[in-house]
Image (cartoon, rainbow, N blue to C red):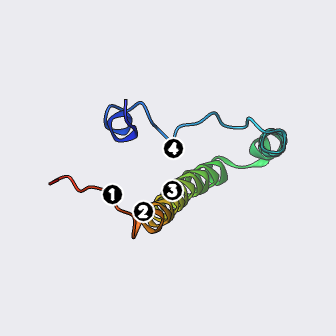
Amino acid sequence: MKILEELWYGSVTPNVRPVGQDDKARKLGGYILRHEEKLIPLLSEEAKAIYEKIRDNQRELHNLEECEAFCRGFRLGARIAYETMEGTDVPSIDD
């Protein structure tokens, strides 16, 4: 199957990957979790609600940033592929 077909059928999902596979990310995630576990009990109910809103906003921002980074990377890859093929004698679809 060609890459575009795999993308169409959902076989290629570059935005879905195992999280925390590398040691550094796993450690950082652990630190964040431990700090949150210590912080949450110290907060009032109002502060907990505000903290959850902040976390939701951070997740949303992170997703937007990841999407933008993916799009930029895809565009760069397309430019590289275009420049690689530019000037070569590649038959067109109409040929």
Q: Residues within 10 Å of mark 3 (few under 14, many from 20)?
A: some
Q: Give the spatial CA distance, label 2 vs label 1.
A: 8 Å
Q: Circles 2 and 4: CB distance less than 8 Å? A: no
Query: Which residue was labeled with disc 2?
Result: 85
Q: Residues within 10 Å of mark 4 (few under 14, many from 20)?
A: few
Considering only order in the chain, which callout, 4 or 1, is on the residue closer to the N terminus?
4
Considering only order in the chain, which callout, 3 or 2, is on the residue closer to the N terminus?
3
What residue appears at the point 47 percent right and 58 percent down from the top-left corner? 74
Relative image position of residue 40 (x, y in whole percent): 74, 44
Relative image position of residue 16 (x, y in whole percent): 53, 37
Query: Which residue was labeled with disc 3?
Result: 70
Query: Which residue was labeled with disc 1?
Result: 90
What amino acid type should be assigned to the residue bearing mark 4? Asn
Query: Which residue was labeled with disc 4?
Result: 15
Considering only order in the chain, which callout, 4 or 2, is on the residue closer to the N terminus?
4
Relative image position of residue 25 (x, y in whole percent): 78, 44
Q: Circles 3 and 4: CB distance less than 8 Å? A: yes
What amino acid type should be assigned to the residue bearing mark 2? Met
Mark 2 or 4, which is nearer the eye?
2
Q: Residues within 10 Å of mark 1 (few under 14, many from 20)?
A: few
